Image (cartoon, grey):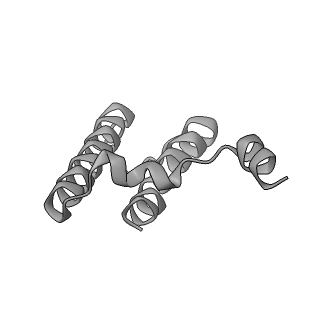
């Protein structure tokens, strides 16, 4: 859920940057594109750090995440 909430907010910025590079940046906005890109990278970094801190705080270990691994071919072979 943390990842979904993070990507929903972060995905808007690259789409906006792409549209602005194609159509041109608004004249009314004085913020240069490079500064927006740095802001995007900072936001992504902070979201990653916050999620790592949250997982550490609740005690999630790497071995607990093994249940999310999927190998469709191995599962199909095991079922037959």
| Viewer-nearest residue: 64 or 12 | 64
Quarter assignment of residue 56: bottom left
Tell me if 64 is positioned left or right of 53 in this view. right
| Viewer-nearest residue: 53 or 47 | 53
Q: Residue 53 in the image: x percent, y percent?
A: 17, 54
Toward the right, the furthest residue is 80
* Labels in figure, total: 0
Say whether residue 38 is visible: yes
Q: Residue 55 in the image: x percent, y percent?
A: 24, 57
Q: Residue at x 39, y 36 (%)?
A: 33
Q: Residue at x 19, y 65 (%)?
A: 58
Toward the left, the furthest residue is 57
Q: Residue 14 in the image: x percent, y percent?
A: 50, 45
Q: Quadrant of the N terminus?
A: bottom left
| Viewer-nearest residue: 55 or 41 | 55
Tell me if 70 is positioned left or right of 5 in this view. right
Q: Residue at x 34, y 47 (%)?
A: 63
Q: Residue at x 39, y 59 (%)?
A: 6
Tell me if 64 is positioned left or right of 25 in this view. left
Q: Residue 71 in the image: x percent, y percent?
A: 67, 43
Say whether residue 30 is visible: no
């Amino acid at each position: 859920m943390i990842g979904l909430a993070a990507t929903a907010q972060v995905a808007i910025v690259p789409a906006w940057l792409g549209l602005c590079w194609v159509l041109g940046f608004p004249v009314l906005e004085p913020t240069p594109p490079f500064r927006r890109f740095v802001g995007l990278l900072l936001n992504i970094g902070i979201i990653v750090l916050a999620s790592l801190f949250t997982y550490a705080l609740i005690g999630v270990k790497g071995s607990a995440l093994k249940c999310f691994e999927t190998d469709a071919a191995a599962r199909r072979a095991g079922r037959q």
